[in-house]
Amino acid sequence: MPGFISIRFLDILDILLVAFLLYQIYRLIKGTVAFNIVIGLFSLYLVGIVVRALDMELLGSIMGQVIGVGVLALIIVFHPEIRKFLVFIGTNYNVNRILMLDKMFSAGKHSKMSTDHITELIEGCKAMAESKTGALIVITQSSELQEQINTGEIVRASVSKALLTSIFFKNSPLHDGAIIISGYKIIAAKCVLPLSQKDVKNKNFGLRHSAAIGITENTDAISIVVSEERGTISFVSDGKIEEDITPKQLTNRLDKFLNPEKSK
């Protein structure tokens, strides 16, 4: 029929893909300062449409210059979100497995954490919670966190309850900061982590909790926080924190992330 709009299957697929992409972007920036910036930019875009419709040449030229450098400004302002989005794609959709990149670059990787080492880690967290010793523990997965490791003191020792409690003992020179575990080894201690970009409203959260959330927002690492004030254990993954969990619950979380075959 003349004048009737024809819709192809590819048009529908195009709309669905764009909607999915926008939804994932919304998930990444929700609750962050970046969300307010996006609203501001969208408002400017709407103003630009109105200005062009009204044929306002002077204001239109100014808006054109602003929009012209907008892409570069977006890259600078949103580089943490862009990085997180790329990590999300590579982690959640197993791009490295599809392309077999994990096999090509698997040489030199650390061994997985064994059940015995997980038990030592759990016992260490339990002992520190009972004594109200503050601790921040980060466990790597595909991201090696070399940038954060370089900010701390190299340890390279097997995970053990005795070593964990010694590092985070309040008079220890290494207690301030985070330890980073890769495989079955504590690679470094006293590491500096990025703080969360989200507006954390829980008054019980201090810098340890903010750092634990921050490192999991930008990487696929997981983290454990032992609260110095409350003596509780929290588990963090993908920027989401589970508060006041039991040692048994922590064991289940670690098995799920570190030994997925076992947890099935």
Image (cartoon, grey):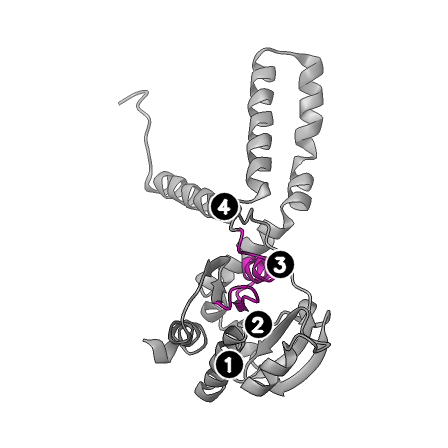
Residue at image mark 2: 137
Q: Is residue 70 visible?
A: yes
- Rounded to the nearest angstrom, the CA distance separating label 2 from label 1 is 10 Å
Across and down, in percent, residue 18 comes to: 44, 42
Drawn side of residue 89 relative to residue 262, left or right = right
In reply to whether residue 96 is colored magenta, the answer given is: no
Badge nearest the viewer, 3 or 4: 3
Residue at image mark 1: 121
197 to 135, vertically: above or below: above
For marks 1 and 4, the one nearer the N-term is: 4
Q: Callout 1 environment at 10 Å: few (<14), some (14 to 19), or many (20+)?
A: many
Q: Amino acid at mark 3?
A: Leu
Q: Amino acid at mark 2?
A: Ile
Badge nearest the viewer, 1 or 4: 1
Q: Amino acid at mark 4?
A: Ile
Q: Residue at x 68, y 39 (%)?
A: 73
Residue 25 — which label? 4
Segment colored magenta:
203-232
**Quick one: 202 or 87, which is closer to the camera?**
202
Q: Callout 4 environment at 10 Å: few (<14), some (14 to 19), or many (20+)?
A: some
Q: Secondary structure at mark 4?
A: helix
For marks 2 and 1, the one nearer the N-term is: 1
- Rounded to the nearest angstrom, the CA distance separating label 2 from label 3 is 13 Å
Q: Secondary structure at mark 3?
A: helix
For marks 3 and 4, the one nearer the N-term is: 4
Across and down, in percent, residue 84 comes to: 56, 55
Across and down, in percent, residue 169 comes to: 64, 78
- Rounded to the nearest angstrom, the CA distance separating label 1 from label 3 is 22 Å
Residue at image mark 3: 207
